[in-house]
Amino acid sequence: HGETVHTADVVVIGAGQAGLSAAYHLQRRGYRPAPETRPRGFVVLDGEEGPGGAWRHRWDSLRMATVNGIHDLPGMEQDPPDACEPSNTALPRYFSRYEERFDLPVVRPVRVEAVERTDEDPRGLLRVRTDRGTWLTRAVVNATGTWNRPYWPSYPGQETFTGRQLHTADYGSAEEFRGRHVVVVGGGISAVQLLDEISQVTSTTWVTRREPVWRDGPFGPDEGRRAVAMVEERVRAGLPPRSVVSVTGLLWTPALRAAARRGALDRRPVFTRIVPDGVRWADGTVQAADVILWATGFRPQLSHLAPLRLRGPGGGIVMDGTRVADEPRVHLVGYGPSSSTIGANRAGRDAVREIDTLLAQD
Ligand code: FAD
């Protein structure tokens, strides 16, 4: 019914760090905004209203001083960071300048709803269906991140809780919780950073499934490589990726040491049940609570790839580097071992190198 059909040799989905890195490397290899140049036309489809990927949505108190270190996008340095500036303005501004500087063909807001095969032949076209028309393409670089898929575990009695439940993705600022008791669930960096902030204004309880592992100094490049290699091995075997922090542990910072002195980091195992006015452990102890903050992480946003049936029996997608092992037309960047700003840069480059070779074969 008159739906617009576009064509592009490569469609990049998502304009976060991983998608922009792919776009940069496509340009360097002579790809140009589709449909002007064919072959070698490409487009980036992004669901956001403006540049910045998921950084647009990070909470205000996540400042350039409190992020772990943001790697530059390929080919252009960030302005010297203002430590006090929230990452949700500094990074979108940088991404915006970047898109302009390299004249990247980012179309937004476009939400990709489904990617389908038009043909089982790996040289056949893929159909990318969106809320703003359809693109036919020879290859997809999927760079959709995790922000839109916050992970909420479920516990018995959860629906009976009369207080507020929220996920880190919904967090605004600690002030919202003043005077209320907050239970923070989760053992990652977000959990401890938010505990630090919230425990400065109100009382908190921290629960994690496993005993947290703390480290004193930043991990060296070797340890970083080992952690990434471990996650890489999982996705090569078709298992769902784990977060790199689950492998590297939590780093003591001066702020977190101060939080520990306040008692905010005295960790308890996770409760077994949620009751209307709090949480309860197996031994019957109850902690009264007004708020449960689920700092339980995110999962890869891949629902639009469901028609491709990429998931295997291991619950994950069998990967070979950035390429889906059974589907050479689809690369996942910013996924698993490349879900960091440096990993995203490399993944964008590697995916483009392989896709360029694939497209040159016909
Ligand atoms: P994103 O930035 O999430 O971009 C994905 C893009 O895809 C978004 O624009 C989204 O709207 C779009 N999209 C999603 N689905 C669709 C769809 N169906 N159709 C169209 N568009 C879609 N890494 C570091 O290296 N250092 C840090 O200090 C650091 N701090 C972090 C702090 C937090 C709180 C979190 C959650 C992560 C942090 N990371 C950090 C990880 C890092 O942010 C990401 O790994 C990195 O930015 C790569 O992003 P990305 O491109 O994969 O995804």
Image (cartoon, rainbow, N blue to C red):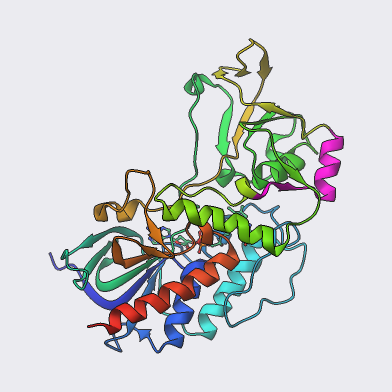
Identify the image quadrant of the N terminus.
Answer: bottom left
Q: Residue shown at 64%/11% (left/top)? A: 283
Type of secondary structure dominating the magenta stretch: helix
Span colored in magenta? 248-262
Residue 131: give x, y in percent of width and height. Answer: 29, 61
Identify the image quadrant of the C terminus.
Answer: bottom left
Asked if residue 42 can be seen in this view, the reply is no
| Nearest the eye: 345 or 262 | 345
Residue 66: give x, y in percent of width and height. Answer: 74, 56
Which picture quadrant has residue 4? bottom left
Instruction: Tell me if residue 256 is in the magenta stretch.
Output: yes
Residue 299 higher or lower than 3, as above or below: above
Which picture quadrant has residue 173? top right
| Nearest the eye: 255 or 176 | 255
Q: Residue shown at 56%/17% (left/top)? A: 276
Residue located farthest toward the left when viewing the structure as drawn: 1
Asked if residue 151 can be seen in this view, the reply is yes
Residue 118: give x, y in percent of width and height. Answer: 16, 65
Instruction: Tell me if residue 109 is in the magenta stretch.
Output: no
Asked if residue 258 lies left or right of residue 298, the reply is right
